[in-house]
Amino acid sequence: MSASNIEASRKKKHRIDPSIKMKRQIGSGTFSFLDIFMGFEKLDAVTGVFGKKTQQILSRLNVEVFPREGFMGVSDEDGHIFASQIYLNTGVEWSVYLDVVHELVHVRQFMEGKELFDNSYSYADRPTEIEAYQVAAKEAGRIGMDEKEIFEYLEVPWISRAEHERLALACEVPSDIVRGKQIRNRKNSLPK
Ligand SMILES: [Zn+2]
């Protein structure tokens, strides 16, 4: 799960492959993954997660769209994706796109029997989250996001700054970008 950074998305256009189509006017209910997220089965980022079984797994995967605010996640009971209808329809496209990639990593982790919500770790230090963010951050770079934008993508509302920094470093955002953001934040917080 992650938040979008609207500011960053206005400045830059990212190059999501034209073969990717995401339905953005979706109702609530349960849908087949490939009916609402088309073309993901061809992405290297996704075949890297599932290997030869990509098509088979995605054709059986369901997405439960719920009619409330929120983001996306994976059920730790049966491994289906759940997603906020509002987020799917109004979230910034590249953010929804990267979150789909992120959640697919959790789908595979669930199939491997991994504990998705292991509370012995904080969110940003949980190995399952780190792996999902690493895959999404790498894909973010491939579609043309720069390191600063990737750093901003990794800033989600429910983690502390220290967690955000650790997560970014784990996703190979260079430490000078991480430090630079800190300095800017301090300046921005000064009264004008
Ligand atoms: Zn996650």
Image (tube, rainbow, N blue to C red):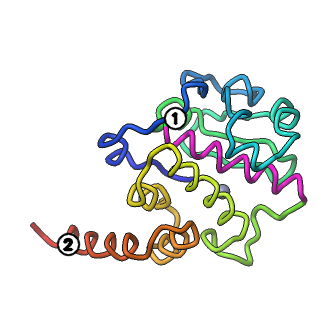
Q: Is 186 on the left or on the right of 140, as rendered?
A: left
- For the point 20% across and 72% down, the residue is 187
Q: Position of residue 56 (x, y in %)?
A: 88, 33
Q: Quadrant of the C terminus?
A: bottom left
The residue lying toward the viewer, choosing from 44 and 78, is 44
CA separation, marks 2 and 1? Answer: 33 Å
Query: Who comes first in sequence, dot 2 or dot 1?
Result: 1
Q: Position of residue 44 (x, y in %)?
A: 69, 43
> Disc 1 marks which amino acid?
Ile
Q: Which mark is residue 83?
A: none
Q: Is 159 on the left or on the right of 67, as rendered?
A: left
Q: Hey, which quadrant is residue 72 in on the image?
A: top right
> Disc 2 marks which amino acid?
Lys
Q: Hey, which quadrant is residue 17 in on the image?
A: top right
| Tally of marks | 2
State the extent of the magenta-drawn residues as a range. 94-112
| Residue under label 2 | 187
Above or below for 70 versus 64: below
Q: Hey, which quadrant is residue 40 in on the image?
A: top right
Q: Position of residue 85 (x, y in %)?
A: 59, 32
Quadrant field for ligand 1: bottom right
Callout in the foreground (2, 1) = 1
Q: Position of residue 74 (x, y in %)?
A: 74, 49
Q: Is 55 on the left or on the right of 119, as rendered?
A: right
- For the point 32% across and 47% down, the residue is 7
Label 2: element kind: helix
Q: Is 142 on the left or on the right of 174, as rendered?
A: right
| Residue under label 1 | 16
